[in-house]
Amino acid sequence: MKIFSKSDIGKKRATNQDSFADKVLAENMSWSIVCDGMGGLSAGEIASSRAVGSISDFFQSNLSESSSREDIKKYMFEAARLANEEIYKATKENPELGKMGTTLVMCVVKDDFAGIAYLGDSRAYLLTDDSISQISVDHSIVQQMLESGEITPEQAKNHPQKNIITRALGIDPTISLDYKEVSIPPKGKILLCTDGLTNYLDSLEMLDILKGNSGEDATERLIAESNERGGKDNITVSIIET
């Protein structure tokens, strides 16, 4: 099992408010975390880095090859809860940070099983040699409008409220985390990414790049393509190869 992750500031932002961490625990087990922070000044950067740090520490202390599927789900929920508490507390103790928060998408893979938990509009995809499917569902105003039939998928691509999310880590004292489990086919991949990628590339364009390149080259190409198309946001990509 291999992981290839990279974050890029993009072409327009002064700071990178994305954060990530990953680890291969064993030949058959790994995890990855991707966050996209928000808030004034450096608050978004602080929120995302604290979330990644807190969850990473929890995974390091608790996840192991002996962890069952039930354990993995329990650990992911507990890790997110503790990270949320830490960020929310920091905001209350440091009013100058404003109302900082962060998206979260994280994945734990064991054998052919993947558990994915998420908040906000950072995404998780399942990839095979010839197909790609989105696992996560955006927690956003535009997603709600899509589901209600208010707008079409085409209108959603450039909607003025595209970046307004409805759930995040650190904003409220409690969180509502979504969780999904998927089976990974032989030679399948999990892709985690921030909206700095998905705002520029659709799923089929991502699949084309992933099919034609190794994991390391694919992360570079995905980021480079996003920058070539504008690079208005930070871009983070993490690819888990089983």
Image (cartoon, grey):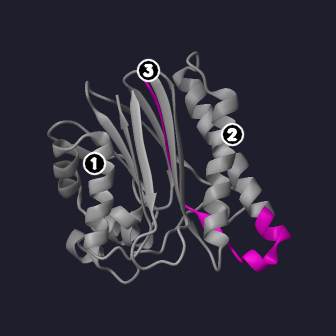
Tell me if 171 is positioned left or right of 96 in this view. left
In whole angstroms, how far apart are the C-alphas of marks 3 and 1?
22 Å
Stretch of the chain drawn in magenta: 90-110
Residue 93 percent location from the top left of the image: 85, 68
> Residue 57, which numbered label?
2
Q: Mark 1: few, some, or many residues within 10 Å (few <14, many ≥20)?
A: many
- In the image, residue 101 lies in the stretch drawn in magenta: yes
Q: Nearer the viewer, mark 3 or mark 1?
A: 1
Residue 202 percent location from the top left of the image: 23, 61
In whole angstroms, how far apart are the C-alphas of marks 2 and 1?
28 Å
Quick one: SS at disc 1?
A: helix
Q: Earlier in the sequence, mark 2 or mark 1?
A: 2
Residue 199 percent location from the top left of the image: 32, 69
Q: Mark 3: few, some, or many residues within 10 Å (few <14, many ≥20)?
A: some
Amino acid under disc 2: Asp
Residue found at x 52% / y 78% = 14
Amino acid under disc 3: Asn
Tell me if 166 is positioned left or right of 41 in this view. left
Quick one: SS at disc 3?
A: loop
Q: Residue 113 lies in what quarter of the image?
A: top left
Is residue 71 something one can see in this rendering? yes
The residue carrying mark 1 is 218
Residue found at x 39% / y 66% = 196
The residue carrying mark 3 is 28
In whole angstroms, how far apart are the C-alphas of marks 2 and 3?
20 Å
Front one among 124 and 45: 45
- In the current view of this chain or complex, which residue is farthest to the bottom? 160
Q: From the image, which quarter does the N terminus lie in?
A: top left
Q: In the rendered view, would you say 189 is above or below 175?
A: above
